[in-house]
Amino acid sequence: MTRPSTDLFLGGGDTGRLMARLDWADTPLGPVGGWPQSLRAAVRMVLSSRYPMLLLWGESYSQLYNDAYSALIGDKHPAALGDDVRVTLAEGWPVLAPLIEEAMATGVASWVPALQLLLERAGYREEAYFSVSHAPARDDDGRTVGVLTVCSEVTQQVVGERRLRLLRDLSVLGDGRTVDVDATAARLIDVIDGHPLDVPFAAIYLRDGTALRRVACTGGDHRHARALPDAVELTDPGPPAYAWGLPDAAEGRATPVTDVADRLPLPAGPWNDPVRTALALPLPSADEDQPLGVLLAGVSPSRGLDEAYHSFHQLLAQQISVALRNAREYEEERRRVEAMAELDRVKTDFFANVSHEFRTPLTLILGPLTDALTDATAPLAAVQRERVETGWRNATRLLTLVNSLLTFSSLEAGRARSDARMVDLAALTAELAGVFRAAVERAGLTLEVSCPPLPRPVAVDPVNWERIVTNLLSNALKYTFIGRIRVTLDTDDEEVRLTVADTGIGIAERDLPKLFERFHRVRGARSRSHEGTGIGLALVHELARLEGGDVRVTSQVGVGSRFTVTLPWSAAHRTAITGPAVDGRGDAARAAVEDAIGWLTEPDDAPTEPDPTSGAATDELAGARILLADDNADMRAYLTRLLTGQGWRVRAVTDGRQALDEIHRDLPDLVLTDVMMPVLDGFDLVRRLRADPTTRALPVLVLSARSGGEASVEGLSLGADDYVVKPFAAAELIARIRASIRRARDRTPAVAVVGDPPTVAAAAPPARTAPVGPATPSPTVDPVRDAVVIEPAPAEPDGLGDLLDVGWTFPSAPTSAAAMRRDVRGALVELDVDPDVLEDLLLAASEAMNNAVEHAQRPSRPEVRVRVQVGGGLIRISIRDFGTWRDRRPAMDRGRGALLMNAYGDVRLVSTAEGTTVTIERRLA
C-alpha cells in the first residue's frame, strides 16, 4: 500500500513538506488519494522545478506551488497553499484574471515579459513586475481544468532601467550650457517631473551665503510647493526647515523625513498612495564641508527604501550637483569673458586716447627739429646736427609706433574703415618694395620684385596696403641673414595675391597658429634686433581682413617663410571714393626703412677713444675701458659720445654674444648692457659673467626700458651691480658708472704692469703690520654641536686667505645665526681684529645668514655654508645657500637687512640655479 501524502511531495523542499502535512481533505481538491493522475504529474513537475511555478486547479483556482514561488508572495505563504488565488492575490487579481481566464477558456498559453502587479507582501502596497506565462492544465480526459503559471520577478530590472533613464536624461542636461544656474535647475526639475514613479516630488535648494534658496520645485501642483520653505537662513533655520531636514543636509548629512503626508498630501505611485517619506540629500561640491545645496526628493510609497533605492538617490544628487556646478562654471566663465571683453574695450579706448594725445607733443618735437635741420640761414654745427638728427629719427619712430597703435586700437574697437580708391596696385607695391632696396642690399641680401601690371585696377585703401607691405618686408628683413627677399604680385580669375617670401630663419610649426595674434613673439628667435611691439603681423592680418581679404603663412625652420595676402576680386571691385589722395604716401615705408637701417649699423671694430680735451685732468678714472652692448644704433652712438666725453674708452657691440667674445678677448673695467637684445640678452649675459670665475667680479651696469621693482630685482639678483631704467639722466648714469668702477677697484687691488693701459685695479695697499700678526698655516677651530668644519681652501692669488681661510656648514635653521656668530668671532678674535670692525662684520653676516635661511626655497641641500678669509688687507665673509631666491613678503620685510649689510661692509650678491652667495668685505686698515 502506498503513502500518497508522503511520496507525492518527496523532493519538494520546504514547500513539499508543508504540502505533505496539509489536510487536503478540507480543500476543494479533496484527499490526495483521490487526485487524478494528471494532477499528481503536474504537482511532481512543479515541486521538482527550481523556477517559480504555480499550479491553479479546479473551479476554485486552488494553489499548488514550489519553494521558488513561495519567495515571490512573501508573507502570504504558507496560507496560500490550497487556497483560492483570487483571495490570496486579491489586490492583483484585476490584472491576472484576464490572462488566467483566457487560458482556461481557449486552452492557449500566453506570456507577458513585465507584468505590473500590486502586491501586499511586505506590509505596504508594493509595485512589482513579473515575467509570466500562463498555460492550460488538463485532466486525465484532456479537459482544461486549471492553469500552470511559470513566472519570475523582474522588478529590480524594470525599476533599475527606469531609474537609469532618469539619470541619463539628467546627464544630457549637465553640459552647463544654459543661461544661468537657476535655468539649469529648472530644466533638471522638468526632467525629474517626467519620472514620478521613482521621484514623486523634488525641490532643489542652493546655498546663497548663509542661506539656502529654493530655485526649483516639482511633484504636484503649485499648492504643494507652498508646503516647502522658499528660503532657509542656516544661522537660524527654524522648525519648518528642521522638519524637512534641510539644515542637516546643508552640513553634509543625508536626512530622512518620515512625516511627509502630514505636511504635503501628495498621491503618488501606480496606485496614488500618499507619499510618506522623503530624503534631504546634500549636493556635493569641491568643498566637502560645504555642500553646493540640498536636494529634497520624495520616496515612492510603492517601493521600499532599500539599499538600491538609497544608492539611486545618491546618484541623483550627484548628477544634479554636476549639472549645477557645470552651469555655475559656465556662467562664471561667461562673466569672465564679458569682463575681459569690457576690459579689452576700455584698454583699446585708452590706447586710442593716449595715442591721440601723443600726436600733439610729437608735432611740436618733429616740427622744430625739422626746421633746425633744414634752416639754411642758421646751419647747425656738425656736433649739434648729429644730436638733432638723432632726436628727429627717434621722434619719427615714435610717431610710427603711435600710428600703429592708433590703427590697431581702431581695428580692435571696430571703428576702422577702408577708404578704398582705384589704384594701380602693381605700381604701388613695386614702389613700396623699392623703398626697402637700399636697406636690403646693405644687409647683404637680394631684393627681387615681380609686380607685373594687373588686368584691371583694384579698389583698395592705399594707406592700409602700405602698412601691409611695409610690415611684411620689415619682418622679412629682420629675420633674414643670408639669401634673398622676394616680393611678387599675381592674379587669377578669383583673387589678387601679394607674396613676400624670404630665406630667413623660418618659423616652427608650433608657433604658426599664434603668429597673427597681437603681442605674440617667437621666443628665442634669432633676429637683427629685439625691438618691436609685437603687433606688426597682427596688424597685417586685421588690415587684410578689413580690405576684404586674408593672409596666410607657410614656413620651415632654416629654410624661410612665405606670407601671402589674398584679395578677392569681389572685394577689389568695391565702390571707390573720389577726391584728393591722402598726403604722406610712402611715409610709413620710409620710417620702417630708417628703423631697419639702425639694426644694420654695425659698430666700429676699434674702440672709440676719448677726446684728449675731455674729462678732468686729475680724474683717477680717466682711460677706464667700458664695453657697451645695445642693439639700437642711435643708443650706441649716444652712449658712446656721452662716455668718451668723460675720458673713457668705449667698445660698442650689438648683442650679448659679441659682448662675451670681447670680454674674453680684452677684459674691460665695466660692462654697460641693455636687456632686450638679440642672440643673447642682457640678463643671460650677466648670468654667464657671474658663472665664470674670471669675470665674476667684473662690474656690470644694466640699462633697460623695463621699469618696476620686479625687473630691477631680477637683474640685481643675477649679480648686476646696478640697474638703470630708461629714460635716464646723463649725469645720473655717469655717477652710477663712476661708483661701480670705484667699488670694483677698492674691492680688487692688483699690481700694475708696466706698459699696460689703465685698468680698474688700483695699486695694492701697504700690508698691515699690526695688530693682525704673522700668518698661521692652519688655524684651529673647535667644531660646535650644530656645525661641521670644512677644510681650509687654498689661498687666492691676490693674497686673500693668507692669514685665515676657514669655513663651516650650518643647518638651514633660524638658530644657526647664533652659532655662526660664535664660530666667526672665535676665528677672528685670534687675529686681534679691531673689536668695532668685528662687531660690524658679525652684524652684517647675521643678516646675510637670516636671509639665506628665510629666502632660499626648495634648497637642494638644507644647509648654509660660511667661509671666512683674511689676507691682502681684507676680511671677506661669504654666506652661501643652495636654494632659489624667494623675495620676502612686504609684511615680513623690515626693510633694514640690505641697509645694515651695506653699512658695515662692501656687499655683493650672486644668485645662480645652484644657490645664492652673499659676500661681505671690509678693509683691515
Image (cartoon, grey):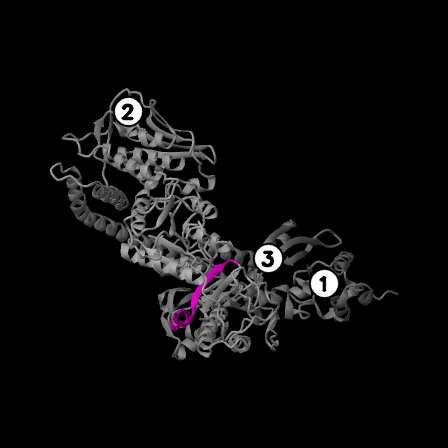
Q: CA distance from mark 2 to mark 1?
A: 100 Å
For this view, does 264 lie left or right of residue 416?
Answer: right
Point out the frontmost of discs 3 and 1: 3
What residue would you read off at disc 3?
157
Confirm whether the magenta stretch covers residue 907. yes
Residue 313 vs residue 823, the one in the foreground: 823
Residue 839 point in image, percent of width and height: 46, 77
For label 2, the residue is 426
* Kind of residue at badge 3: Gln
Specify start and end residues of the magenta stretch as a single range.
Answer: 892-913
* Nearest-to-viewer mark from 2 and 1: 2
* Viewer-side residue, 48 vs 890: 890
What amino acid type is highlighted by mark number 1?
Asn
Q: Tell me if residue 225 is in the magenta stretch.
A: no
Q: Which mark is residue 66?
A: 1
Marks 2 & 1, CB-CB < 8 Å contact: no
What x and y, as percent, mark residue 776? 59, 71
